[in-house]
Amino acid sequence: MVRLTLEEQEMLDGKQGRLKQVAMENIVRYAQVLGASELCRVTKATVFCGAHNYLEVCKSQDFHEVFSKMNLARDERIPFDCVDKNCYVQSCVAASDQYEYKIFDQPKEVFEKNSYYLEESRKAGVIIAGSCSPYLMGWIPVKGEHFVTTESGVTILGNSLWGACCNADGIEAAFWSAICGRTPYWGYHVKENRYGTHLFHIKAHLDSSMDWEVLGKAMGKRLPLTGCTPVIEGNFEGVDFVKLKSFFTALAITTNCRMCHIVGITPEANTLEEAFMGHEIQGEDTIEDKDIADAYEELCETKDGSVDLVSLGCPHYDIHQIQEVAEYMKGKKVHPGTRFMVWTVYPVKAMADLNGYTKIIEEAGGTIQTSTCPVTIGDCFLKHYPGQVYDSLKQSGSVRSDGSAQRVYYTDKYHCMDAAVSGRWKEEYRWKKKF
């Protein structure tokens, strides 16, 4: 039995409209399956809007019919015309750029359909942000705030770095919560469940964001597939947000964990004792420099070949990262046979324009893109580029797993830019862990 407040019961009874009623019905069923006895209020959400490929299984040109079947699990047509007024809802990356389609080899009808889907979502109250990095646009949940998201990296960032509360609920459940402003009170929404399970002693030297990102992979190889909340302790000097978002995103995609305590840094782990909340340590391990170097060797193609696409920015770049790219590329030229792209969010792109960074990158032969990413666009774009280079473990891993390229290289952003200029992959571009 799920206990409901008066307002929640009114939604369930249909007094606030059919859309909220169905969303609440789904949330209540979800809570029953999970064994949750009550719901909690959700005040932030990111949702997966746009005309994504998986939606094509619903043979309809009507957005609201597709939304009803695919996201609400109903055969009746229920217009998606509102989200909860107390919930700050942003869209994640979409299946197409909002301004361009030819550069991505997409048919015009795909572009127009995506624009139509986004416009209908905007009318419902979703803020069209088009990013996997909503925190770059002010979407930052604070300690104790309950949120939902379709992004694994945002889930673990919110739980770990800000002490906010979220589970990995999925695309459909995120929409239900955005509509009715509720989610089952279970998992990481419950304070008592947010304790650490596995302890890692980090003896490796973590200097760069790449060090931190590959650390996520090295840890992931040693964690169980489910039911873990790692805790790491070590001498972490010079840590910053870019390094942490790289680490958390990599950890999220190489494991199923959705929270990680860093002793002395994250809000619920001022001490080792606080991180474990009195619970027994279920596993203990040590990560050294060699472990990180070995983890990298599994992530980068070993064969030399042409570099046809270089993509920077997953998660999307902030303005300082773009500044670093512009400064490095100033006076250089991208190889004529190579496409060079930097990915960010709309406001940061405007800042890059204002500060002259866009001009420098374009003069070098590259572009700054928003709204989406190579993997989200998919095969219609990626199939044209046999050799692809990424500075993102997440992006390179996704391309490698779906077979979208013949060769996938992964290295730090500066070697990525070197590869874009030369047009060929060289052994010297491989990232080398400094011991």
Image: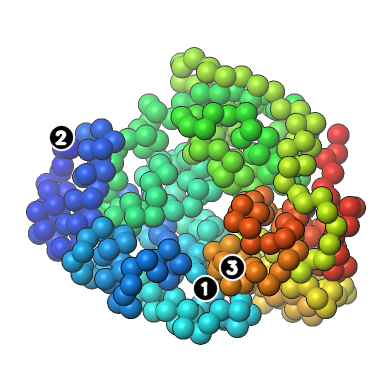
Does residue 378 appear to the left or right of 36 in the view shown?
A: right
Residue 1's disc is: 2
Residue name at image x 37 percent, y 66 percent? 57
Q: Are marks 1 and 3 in contact (CB under 8 Å)?
A: no
The answer for how far apart the CA atoms under marks 1 and 2 are is 43 Å
> Residue 269, position in %: x, y?
54, 28
Image quarter (top left, top right, bottom left or bottom right) of the C terminus: top right
Residue type, label 1: Ser
Q: Nearer the viewer, residue 95 or 313?
A: 95
Q: Are marks 2 and 3 in contact (CB under 8 Å)?
A: no
Q: Label 1 crowding class (10 Å Cα cut-off): few <14, some 14-19, many 20+?
A: many
Residue name at image x 51 percent, y 23 percent? 197
Q: Nearer the viewer, residue 166 or 145?
A: 166
Evaluate whether residue 42 shows in this view: yes
The answer to which of marks 1 and 3 sits earlier in the sequence is 1
> Residue 208, position in %: x, y?
76, 45
Does residue 407 appear to the left or right of 331 in the view shown?
A: left
Q: Secondary structure at mark 1?
A: loop
Q: Secondary structure at mark 3?
A: helix
- Residue 340 lies, with reference to residue 213, above or below; the image says below
The answer for how far apart the CA atoms under marks 2 and 3 are is 46 Å
Evaluate whether residue 244 shows in this view: no
Residue 96's disc is: 1
Residue type, label 3: Asp
Residue under label 3, please give it: 379
Q: Nearer the viewer, residue 288 or 51?
A: 51
